[in-house]
Amino acid sequence: MTRHVRRWWPDAALGVLVASAGAFEMSARSIGRWWIVAVLAVAVGLFRRAPVAAAALLWVLLYAHLRTGSTLLITEVTTALVAYGAARWGRTVTVWFSGLSILALGVLGVWLVGTRLDIVLPLVPLVDAATLKRVLVDPPGVGTQVALIPLGLALVGFGPPWLLGLAVRSIDEARRSRALQHLAEDHAALAHQQVEREREIAELRAGQARLARDVHDVVGHSLAVILAQAQAAAYLQDPDEVRATVDRIADAARRSLQDVRTVLESTQVEGAAVRAQRPPGTLDALVTGLRDAGHGVESTVIGIPQPLPPELETVAYRVAQEMLTNAVRHGDRREPVHVEQVWSTHSGDGAGQLRLEVRNTVAADAAPPQRPGLGVDGMVRRLASVGGSLDARLHDGWFVATASLPVRAVLR
């Protein structure tokens, strides 16, 4: 309430000032009517907050003068403020209405001087009616020229304030438009920064997840191989066989260390370089390494192997590595691991599918894992990232893991 009053009090004070000046002029010159002064004061008081109402009151004021023949007050020059306010603060319709009103006022004055001089004469203050009539009518021909005076007075009295209000309005709108544009640009910059920040966070999280999966695959595979060989070495009697097993364990540890170093170095490369980096080996090399470590592996390749893009080759390698790790860790070591690669081509452009299947028997006394590991989840995520899928199930004493991923030809 206090803020509302604070906004209105300058306009109210101006209205009171105009009313006081009009009352003083009425008293000093013994002319005018009090309610005309009241309408004038209200119109001037509303010129900023309600320019439409103020302009309408001016027409009421003019009608009152013409109806009653009341002399115009000098105080009524303050009505120029209404013209300024209509152009400065009014709506677009108000601006047009006020501008046309100024022209209409001038045209009405010309018509009254030319046809109803008896109405005009009492309105003009400080001029003797007989003198004014003599100037307008005599000599012949002068009255026609003088009749245009009201139009000039309307344009001179109300035109400049109206044009000034229109100019200030245009400047203010241009300033507001620039401020809104700057605000929109600031919002756009902040939104862009937020998007960039979220993208960086997403990339960091994706990099962390990728690093965790790679380390899990590398270390898990190597430790499974090393553990199996170490457990087998406990039953060996021949020193040469023990020495050969220890050498294989050392080789597996060195390969694991090199793979971990490669994974960690890949985190220093950003963007597409990370995705384009190829794995440390091939699918056949995985099978050969497992066979060299002393595990029985039966490998079958159906179809014609094709060179894969780096991202697909990496996914295929890591998924096969994890499936072999699980087979070594949870399978019956007395039975071989069966690995099958099926390459199929659907069209002449090299597109097709690669199906990787790893089957191993499960020992009857094998204990189930205490908790689900990261391996299966990691394989699912890797395959999903390239449009592939994973199926893993236990069937008639066999654990079968099948990975399918689309094959896209390498662009030459």
Image (cartoon, helix red, strand yellow):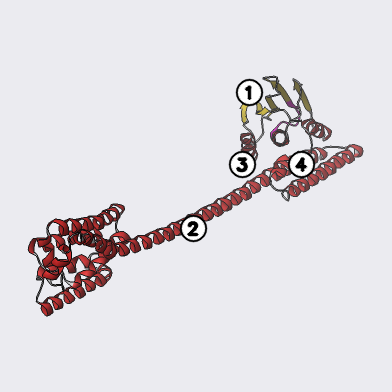
Question: Which mark sits nearer the N-terminus, 1 or 2?
Answer: 2
Question: Can you identify the residue that label 4 sits on?
Answer: 222
Quarter placement of the N terminus: bottom left
Q: Residue 182 carries which label?
A: 2
Q: Which of marks 3 and 2 is in front?
A: 2
Q: Position of residue 143 (x, y in %)?
A: 19, 61
Q: Report which quarter residue 405 is drawn in.
A: top right
Considering the numbered disc 4 on the image, is that residue within a helix, a strand or a loop?
A: helix
Q: Which of marks 1 and 2 is in front?
A: 2
Q: What residue type is labelled 2?
A: His
Q: Position of residue 379 (x, y in %)?
A: 65, 36
Question: Can you identify the residue that label 1 sits on?
Answer: 396
Say left or right for 215 vs 158.
right
Q: Where is residue 399 in the image (x, y as percent from the top left)?
A: 66, 28
Q: How many labels does the image show?
A: 4
Question: Which mark sits nearer the N-terminus, 4 or 1?
Answer: 4
Q: Which amino acid does label 3 sit on?
A: Gln
Question: Which mark sits nearer the N-terminus, 4 or 3?
Answer: 4
